[in-house]
Image: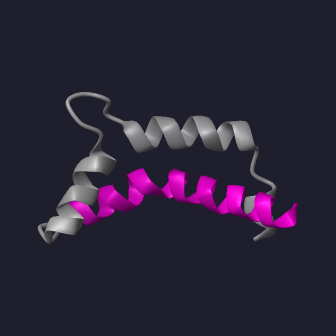
Amino acid sequence: MEFIDNLPLPTLIIGALALGLAPFFPEPHLVEKLRMLFQGTLTKPIDIFDLLMHASLPVLLAIRLVRMALAG
Protein backbone atom coordinates (compact mmCIF):
# COMPACT_ATOMS: atom_id res chain seq x y z
CA MET A 1 0.00 0.00 0.00
CA GLU A 2 3.00 2.28 0.38
CA PHE A 3 3.26 2.28 -3.43
CA ILE A 4 -0.24 3.77 -3.71
CA ASP A 5 0.54 6.34 -1.00
CA ASN A 6 3.56 7.52 -3.01
CA LEU A 7 1.69 8.04 -6.28
CA PRO A 8 1.37 11.76 -7.10
CA LEU A 9 -2.24 12.82 -6.56
CA PRO A 10 -2.44 15.27 -9.52
CA THR A 11 -1.16 12.57 -11.88
CA LEU A 12 -3.73 10.10 -10.56
CA ILE A 13 -6.55 12.62 -10.98
CA ILE A 14 -5.61 13.51 -14.55
CA GLY A 15 -5.03 9.86 -15.46
CA ALA A 16 -8.30 8.72 -13.87
CA LEU A 17 -10.26 11.36 -15.75
CA ALA A 18 -8.50 10.72 -19.06
CA LEU A 19 -8.59 6.92 -18.95
CA GLY A 20 -11.92 6.65 -17.15
CA LEU A 21 -13.74 8.88 -19.62
CA ALA A 22 -11.97 7.89 -22.86
CA PRO A 23 -13.29 7.99 -25.51
CA PHE A 24 -15.36 11.02 -24.67
CA PHE A 25 -17.88 10.60 -27.51
CA PRO A 26 -20.34 8.98 -28.04
CA GLU A 27 -20.05 7.34 -24.60
CA PRO A 28 -17.11 6.60 -22.28
CA HIS A 29 -16.03 2.96 -22.39
CA LEU A 30 -16.15 2.72 -18.61
CA VAL A 31 -19.83 3.68 -18.57
CA GLU A 32 -20.57 1.27 -21.43
CA LYS A 33 -18.72 -1.63 -19.80
CA LEU A 34 -20.33 -1.03 -16.39
CA ARG A 35 -23.74 -1.02 -18.06
CA MET A 36 -22.86 -4.31 -19.77
CA LEU A 37 -21.72 -5.74 -16.42
CA PHE A 38 -24.99 -4.85 -14.68
CA GLN A 39 -27.04 -6.16 -17.61
CA GLY A 40 -25.11 -9.43 -17.62
CA THR A 41 -23.81 -9.02 -21.17
CA LEU A 42 -20.13 -8.54 -20.29
CA THR A 43 -18.93 -11.94 -21.50
CA LYS A 44 -16.22 -11.39 -24.12
CA PRO A 45 -12.64 -11.42 -22.78
CA ILE A 46 -11.82 -8.22 -24.67
CA ASP A 47 -14.73 -6.42 -22.96
CA ILE A 48 -13.60 -7.64 -19.53
CA PHE A 49 -10.05 -6.47 -20.26
CA ASP A 50 -11.42 -3.13 -21.46
CA LEU A 51 -13.38 -2.69 -18.22
CA LEU A 52 -10.31 -3.50 -16.12
CA MET A 53 -8.10 -1.15 -18.15
CA HIS A 54 -10.49 1.81 -18.04
CA ALA A 55 -11.29 1.29 -14.34
CA SER A 56 -7.70 0.81 -13.12
CA LEU A 57 -6.75 4.45 -12.49
CA PRO A 58 -10.14 5.51 -11.08
CA VAL A 59 -9.91 2.59 -8.63
CA LEU A 60 -6.34 3.55 -7.66
CA LEU A 61 -7.49 7.14 -7.14
CA ALA A 62 -10.37 6.00 -4.94
CA ILE A 63 -8.03 3.83 -2.84
CA ARG A 64 -5.59 6.72 -2.49
CA LEU A 65 -8.31 9.16 -1.43
CA VAL A 66 -9.77 6.73 1.11
CA ARG A 67 -6.32 6.10 2.59
CA MET A 68 -5.70 9.85 2.80
CA ALA A 69 -9.04 10.39 4.55
CA LEU A 70 -8.40 7.58 7.05
CA ALA A 71 -4.88 8.85 7.78
CA GLY A 72 -6.44 12.17 8.70
Compared to 3, does 28 lie above or below? Answer: above
Q: Which quadrant of the rendered structure holds the C terminus?
A: bottom right
Nearer to us in this view, 60 or 72: 72
In the image, what residue occupies the spot 47% across and 35% down? 18
Res 60 quadrant in image:
bottom right
Segment tinted magenta in the rendering: 47-72
Q: Position of residue 46 (x, y in %)?
A: 22, 61
Res 62 quadrant in image:
bottom right
Is residue 8 rendered to the left or right of residue 41? right
Nearer to us in this view, 14 or 46: 14
Is residue 60 rendered to the left or right of residue 19? right
Compared to 1, does 10 lie above or below? Answer: above
Q: Residue furthest right?
A: 72
Q: Position of residue 63 (x, y in %)?
A: 64, 63
In the image, what residue occupies the spot 21% across and 57% down? 35
Nearer to us in this view, 34 or 49: 34
Residue 44 visible in the current orientation: no
Res 52 quadrant in image:
bottom left
In the image, what residue occupies the spot 43% across and 44% down? 20
Residue 60 visible in the current orientation: yes
Is residue 59 rendered to the left or right of residue 49? right
State how many labels appear. Answer: 0
Compared to 8, does 50 lie above or below? Answer: below
Q: Position of residue 54 (x, y in %)?
A: 40, 51
Mostly what secondary structure, the magenta segment? Answer: helix
In the image, what residue occupies the spot 64% across and 44% down? 12
Q: Position of residue 51 (x, y in %)?
A: 33, 58
Was residue 58 drawn as part of the magenta stretch in this picture?
yes
Q: Which quadrant of the rendered structure holds the N terminus?
A: bottom right
Was residue 67 drawn as part of the magenta stretch in this picture?
yes
